């Protein structure tokens, strides 16, 4: 069935389906590294692109392509690429669009490794970078140079929950011929469609909301047009960051319930954020669904909902944070997010420990910041767990 003009939920269930020889109801796992050619001519035709037949799984595989087609349709893109991890997706974008003496502008509070790999590795190959608070577009404008090739935005950010206006940022970048990539992990395709807002590439850590069950690591890229897609695809194939067929099957299965999971998590997240905001031991709460969030209006404009990620600071600082994390029982003390289970973590000592304290503070990640990823358990149980732990914090 052609699902291109169908609704989001119909795409979630059916996009990328195809008929196989046995009438399988779901795309089966083609767990094969290579594909048999019918003749030498057939092999030559496949390599020359005259025949669409499969060649080798790093280049393409039916189970993986099925997922890629679904991802592309969910965000109205030209085509999708599935990768072994979110970081494989990030480095594929960097390699495809950066070169010696090229310059990238990135959100300062971007996912730790997305920043560290530029500072640690790409700098060795002569790539230049600026990290700025992209929630204020004028900060981007100030650092654009003639050699700027890529604008890399994460919105909402991890873990400061700051938003960047994708439409305005894309317009500015395109005036200067700069490619725009949006890390859409925190929103998922259900809440935000960066390509519709003008971005060239949407990037995901599939590990999070898309797979949703904390049992897979994976990444995705969705390209707005053929030119961008071809660059990304070729880089992925040569660098070897491809997804595995079994992984693709698992993701396709988890992805089907994205809307249901998101709706449930968001309903709880709103209640939990409001609960935390009133708690005497809590100094501040960042959640786009709160009126107190500085970009509450932008969130309403560019997102379909406010997400399932909350950050908050405790009045007792670092030590109170430690006590809180050691006294929750339902919320799991673990990094990652976007699964059906509620997770809690401390960025300064965990996900963002790779940054200097100075860089963390400049990016708004204080020592007392606690990150809370809301799952789909009963909301009353999550709040009770927080209530008990906060009493000891
Ligand atoms: C987890 C994450 C990544 C990296 O993805 P992996 O699947 O862990 O490689 C990138 N960006 C964001 C926002 C993330 O949360």
Image (cartoon, grey):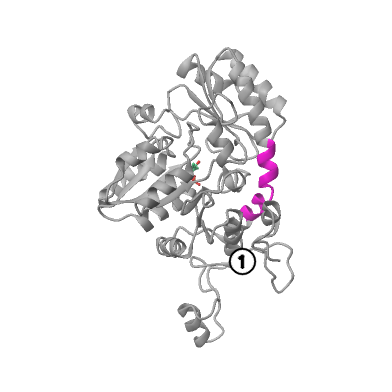
Q: Is residue 334 visible?
A: no
Q: In terms of depth relative to the viewer, which is nearer, 35 or 295?
A: 295
Residue range corresponding to the magenta coloring: 250-264
Q: Which percent across, then down, holds residue 29?
A: 63, 63
Q: Quadrant of residue 95?
A: bottom left
Label 1 residue SS: loop
The residue depicted at 53 percent of the width and 61 percent of the height is: 78
Q: Is residue 219 above or below residue 113?
A: below
Q: Which percent across, then down, holds residue 151?
A: 39, 47
The residue depicted at 59 percent of the width and 65 percent of the height is: 31
Q: Is residue 251 visible?
A: yes
- In which quadrant will I find the C terminus? top right
Q: Quadrant of residue 141?
A: top left
Q: Which residue is mark 1?
A: 30
Q: Which percent across, then down, holds residue 253?
A: 67, 53
Query: Is most of the magenta stretch helix, strand or loop?
Result: helix
Badge 1: how crowded within 10 Å, few (<14), some, or many (20+)?
some
Q: In terms of depth relative to the viewer, which is nearer, 268 or 293?
A: 293
């Amino acid at each position: 069935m052609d699902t291109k003009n169908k609704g989001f939920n119909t795409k979630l269930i059916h996009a990328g389906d195809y008929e196989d020889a046995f009438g399988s109801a779901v795309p089966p796992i083609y767990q094969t590294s290579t594909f048999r050619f019918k003749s030498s001519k057939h092999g030559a035709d496949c390599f020359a692109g005259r025949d669409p037949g499969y060649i080798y799984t790093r280049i393409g595989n039916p189970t993986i392509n099925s997922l890629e087609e679904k991802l592309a349709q969910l965000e109205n893109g030209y085509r999708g690429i599935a990768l072994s991890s979110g970081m494989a997706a990030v480095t594929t974008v960097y390699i495809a669009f950066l070169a010696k003496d090229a310059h990238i502008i990135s959100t300062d509070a971007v996912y730790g490794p997305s920043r560290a790999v530029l500072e640690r590795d790409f700098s060795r190959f002569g790539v230049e970078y600026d990290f700025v608070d992209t929630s204020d577009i004028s900060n981007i404008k100030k650092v654009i140079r003639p050699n700027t090739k890529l604008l890399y935005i994460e919105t909402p950010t991890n873990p400061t929950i700051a938003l960047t206006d994708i439409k305005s940022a894309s317009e500015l970048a395109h005036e200067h011929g700069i490619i725009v990539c949006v890390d859409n992990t925190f929103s998922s395709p259900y809440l935000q469609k960066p390509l519709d807002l003008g971005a060239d590439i949407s990037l995901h850590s599939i590990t999070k909301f898309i797979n949703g069950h904390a049992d897979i690591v994976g990444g995705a890229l969705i390209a707005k047009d053929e030119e961008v897609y071809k660059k990304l695809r070729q880089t992925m194939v040569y660098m070897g960051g491809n997804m595995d067929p079994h992984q693709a099957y698992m993701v396709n299965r988890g992805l089907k319930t994205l809307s249901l999971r998101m709706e449930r998590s968001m309903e709880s997240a709103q209640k939990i954020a409001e609960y935390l905001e009133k708690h005497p031991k809590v100094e501040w709460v960042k959640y786009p669904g709160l009126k107190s969030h500085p970009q509450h209006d932008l969130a309403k404009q560019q997102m379909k909902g406010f997400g399932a990620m909350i950050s908050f600071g405790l009045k007792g600082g670092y030590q109170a944070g430690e006590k809180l994390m050691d006294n929750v029982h339902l919320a799991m003390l673990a990094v990652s997010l976007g699964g059906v289970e509620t997770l809690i973590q401390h960025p300064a000592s965990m996900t963002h420990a790779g940054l200097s304290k100075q860089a963390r503070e400049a990016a708004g990640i204080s020592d007392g910041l606690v990150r809370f990823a809301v799952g789909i358990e009963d909301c009353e149980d999550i709040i009770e767990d927080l209530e008990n732990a906060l009493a000891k914090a």
